[in-house]
């Protein structure tokens, strides 16, 4: 795979709220086969950039492309059709559906009869339902969750719920997986499980982007890290380089008054 051709690329991405520039002409490249971290202090612009990538926000200026195709103006659902999917910072599982049914929701767009009719007693619906269930089970197995497939979300711990969300995001075999603070609210053991699970998902044809405050997680899974501060990148490189970067140290030691 040509990493340049299948990258998620932002060029000159700017975003303003009421005249205040929160992203200042960012050039960024997220490559397949890599896990790329997006870090920075509170208010740096991480979520804003993430939302521009998902389509939740429209950049004031600049362009976002995947595999050379512009994504500008496409809402999140259309981006998902192109294989650009995201996970959410707060767990958003449907409590009345089992774990496997929640993961099946992530596949609905691939089926012509639609998710609801897949549950109706019609031949086509039954076939689609069986196929969806197989694919959902495969995604759960990839994350070691097949044992909780028939449980309800409230019956499993928060760390498992977070992994179920990720299973829902990967069930449709995305090309780009955008993870918004996947470790938020998890304890140390759950974060360790998550770290292992994310590492195991890395694949040559998958672009993975992780916005995260947990530095241990970011440093241990990312191949490259972009560091944002006040809407601008102050550093980009592999974890070892980022750890030693004087600007990054200054920002994280809290002596940055600019
Ligand atoms: N919808 C909005 N309206 C106005 N200002 C916003 C909006 N969303 C974000 N901002 C501002 O944009 C700046 C960047 O915010 P953003 O949430 O992107 O930062 P962040 O790096 O994700 O921070 P955190 O780590 O605290 O989530 C902040 O000054 C924030 O107040």
Image (cartoon, helix red, strand yellow):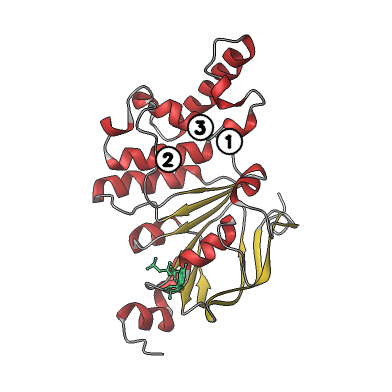
> In the picture, which quadrant includes the C terminus?
bottom left
Q: Which residue is mark 3?
A: 105
Q: Give the percent coordinates (x, y) of residue 235.
A: 50, 76
185 sits to left or right of 197? left
Q: Quadrant of residue 19?
A: bottom right
Q: Secondary structure at mark 3?
A: helix
* Kind of element beneath mark 1: loop
Marks 2, 3: nearer the viewer: 3
Q: Which residue is mark 2?
A: 165
The quarter of the image that holds ligand 1 is: bottom left
Q: CA distance from mark 2 to mark 3?
A: 10 Å
Circle 1 crowding by C-alpha within 10 Å: few under 14, some 14–19, many from 20: many
Q: Residue at x 40, y 42 (%)?
A: 92
Q: For residue 238, say whether it is visible.
A: no
Q: CA distance from mark 1 to mark 3?
A: 10 Å
Q: Residues within 10 Å of mark 3 (few under 14, many from 20)?
A: some
Confirm if mark 1 falls within 8 A of ligand 1. Answer: no
Question: Between disc 1 and disc 2, whose residue precedes?
Answer: 2
Mark 2, secondary structure of its residue = helix
Q: Camera-side residue: 125 or 155? A: 125
Quick check: 257 above or below 202? below
Of badges 1 and 3, the one in the foreground is 3
């Amino acid at each position: 795979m040509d990493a340049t051709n299948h990258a998620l690329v932002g060029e000159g991405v700017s975003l303003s709220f009421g005249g205040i520039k929160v992203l200042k002409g960012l050039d960024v490249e997220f490559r397949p086969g890599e896990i790329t971290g997006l870090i920075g202090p509170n208010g740096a612009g991480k979520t804003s950039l993430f939302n521009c990538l998902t389509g939740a926000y429209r950049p004031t200026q600049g362009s976002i492309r995947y595999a050379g195709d512009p994504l500008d103006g496409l809402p999140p659902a259309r981006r998902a059709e192109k294989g650009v999917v995201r996970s959410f910072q707060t767990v958003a599982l449907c409590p009345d559906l089992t774990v496997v049914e929640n993961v099946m929701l992530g596949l609905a767009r691939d089926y012509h009869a639609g998710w609801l009719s897949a549950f109706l007693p019609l031949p086509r619906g039954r076939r689609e339902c069986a196929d969806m269930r197989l694919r959902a089970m495969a995604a759960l197995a990839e994350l070691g969750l097949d044992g909780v497939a028939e449980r309800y979300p409230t019956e499993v711990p928060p760390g498992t719920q977070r992994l179920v969300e990720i299973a829902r995001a990967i069930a449709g075999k995305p090309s780009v997986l955008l993870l918004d603070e996947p470790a938020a609210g998890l304890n140390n053991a759950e974060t360790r499980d998550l770290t292992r699970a994310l590492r195991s998902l890395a694949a040559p044809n998958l672009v993975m982007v992780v916005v995260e405050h947990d530095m241990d997680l970011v440093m241990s899974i990312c191949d490259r890290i972009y560091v944002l501060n006040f809407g601008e990148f102050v550093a980009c490189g592999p974890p070892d380089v980022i750890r030693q970067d004087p600007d990054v140290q200054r920002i994280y030691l809290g002596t940055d008054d600019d």
